Amino acid sequence: MKSPKDGGASNPRKIARRGEARLSWAAVLVWVVAAALPARAEIFTRQVNLAYLAQRADLIVQGRVIGVSYEGLPGYPHIPTVLVTLEVERMLRGPAGGHYTFRQWIASRRELGGKRGYQVGQRLVLFLLSPSQYGLSGPIGREQGRFHIVRDTRGSEQIANEFGNAGLFRNVSETAEKAGASLTEKQMQTASATSGVVPLEDFVGLVEHLKSLPRIQ
């Protein structure tokens, strides 16, 4: 068995140095992730409604996922990210072009696959923030700002976020009224849903109207 003098694994000084190195790297990782994310905390978990999404998003895009690459953040390979490329079907707010690519930080393993992951062929509507100084973006409210487009049994296109639209339309009509942008009867009908899918075109029409509300920074 190696003694501490032999430089073995049991050497307290070596163990302490390894611990300090891990702590230093963890501190750097936390700092980089914090700096890399867009400035506002709503990218995470607090409940937001559709009016807020439309007012806050720097980019609102409908498209089909054509490229997905899970990789480290350039320059910081231990920070996991996903690079997503969309074939743009409709740009509701943002630059013109046939494709749009963004990079998102992966906060947990559950985001690597399944419904929460990005997969080629998905059709999505995303409410995104502008990329940070490190090139990271992501849906506002995470699952709340990422909507899946599906077809029902009759072939009609429907849409819902990953919370099943729960709470999405709460106080939307009131927010519009206060801003002097009253909803039409059709828009009020869409905004009256408490949860569940809604017709895609009705959803887009409501978003187009809510885009006229004062922006939130």
Image: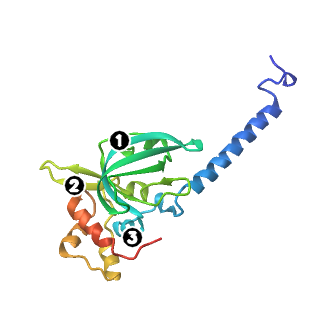
Q: Is residue 193 visible?
A: no
Which residue of the protein is positioned furthest toward the front in this rendering? 97
Cβ atoms at labels 2 and 1 below 8 Å apart: no
For mark 3, give the secondary structure. helix
Q: Amino acid at mark 1?
A: Gln
Task: Using the image, determine if residue 193 lies above or below residue 100.
Answer: below
Q: Are marks 3 and 2 in contact (CB under 8 Å)?
A: no
Name the residue that disc number 2 marks: 158
Q: Indicate which disc, 3 or 2, sits on the residue closer to the N terminus.
A: 3
Q: Is residue 141 above or below residue 29?
A: below
Residue 97 relative to residue 31: left or right: left
Alpha carbons under labels 1 and 3: distance apart: 27 Å
Q: Nearer the viewer, mark 2 or mark 1?
A: 1
SS category of the residue bearing label 1: loop
State the image quarter where residue 191 is shown.
bottom left
Please name which of the two marks, 3 or 2, marks the residue nearer to the observer. Answer: 3
Q: Which residue is mark 3?
A: 55
Badge 1 is on which residue?
A: 119
- Give the numbered dot on residue 77: none
Three-letter residue code for mark 3: Gln
Residue count near mark 3 (Cα–Cα under 10 Å), binned few <14, some 14–19, many ≥20: some
Residue 111 left/right relative to 200: right
Q: Position of residue 143 (x, y in %)?
A: 39, 54
